[in-house]
């Protein structure tokens, strides 16, 4: 069990520095693992599985459990990245609302000529330490619509 836990930790650590293409492959692999886990659970629940040797059923159950744990850890890591990205976007938009207009005096207000929303979001992502990965997610969200 220690080996499985170590493997999961190493896999998550390796994906932390991945580029966009590698993360897409990891997401596809995670989807495949999910399908394999569901299939294996279905097979182990059939009456025909009773004909398998007891140690095969045990190893199958352990493999399903290990795969479920690995998939859960990966999904939790991706959820954390998405949560940080979403929070940075929200904070950036809130910060941009404050920067959008400059009040010179009671009668004069000047619009900010820069794009304060993008700048504020980028600043929030940098502060959270997720700028590169978060920026990729934002780009994917723009494409997905």
Image: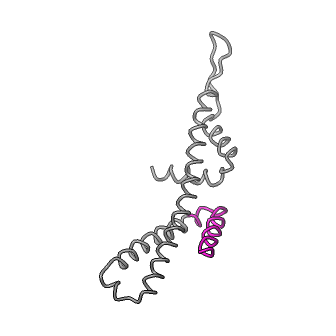
Q: Position of residue 112 (x, y in %)?
A: 64, 27
Q: How is the image coloured?
A: one colour
Q: Is residue 96 above or below residue 103?
A: below
Q: In which quarter of the view is residue 108 placed?
A: top right
Taking the view exactly as shown, the residue that stands out farthest to the top is 106
Q: Quadrant of the N terminus?
A: bottom right
Question: Residue at 52% of width from left, 60% of height from top?
Answer: 75
Instruction: Give the magenta-colored segment's residue range.
Output: 1-23
Closer to us: 2 or 74: 2
Question: Residue at 62% of width from left, 17% of height from top?
Answer: 109
Q: Is residue 2 above or below residue 83?
A: below
Question: Residue at 54% of width from left, 64% of height from top?
Answer: 24
**In the drawing, does residue 39 fall left or right of residue 14?**
left
Query: Is 3 inside the magenta-drawn segment?
Result: yes
Q: Position of residue 67 (x, y in %)?
A: 50, 72
Closer to us: 144 or 82: 82
Q: In which quarter of the view is residue 53 placed?
A: bottom left
Taking the view exactly as shown, the residue that stands out farthest to the front is 54
Closer to us: 58 or 88: 58
């Amino acid at each position: 069990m220690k080996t499985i836990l170590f493997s999961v930790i190493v896999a998550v650590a390796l994906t932390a520095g991945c580029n966009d293409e590698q993360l897409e492959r990891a997401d596809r692999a995670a989807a495949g693992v999910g399908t394999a886990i569901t299939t294996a659970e279905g097979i182990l629940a059939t009456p025909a599985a009773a004909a398998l040797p007891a140690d095969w059923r045990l190893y199958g159950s352990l493999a399903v459990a290990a795969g479920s744990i690995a998939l859960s850890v990966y999904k939790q890591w991706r959820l954390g990245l998405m949560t940080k990205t979403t929070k940075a976007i929200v904070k950036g938009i809130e910060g941009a609302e404050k920067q959008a207009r400059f009040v010179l005096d009671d009668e004069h207000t000047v619009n900010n000529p820069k794009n304060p929303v993008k700048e504020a979001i980028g600043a929030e992502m940098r502060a959270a330490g997720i700028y590169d990965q978060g920026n990729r997610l934002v780009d994917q969200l723009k494409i997905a619509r």
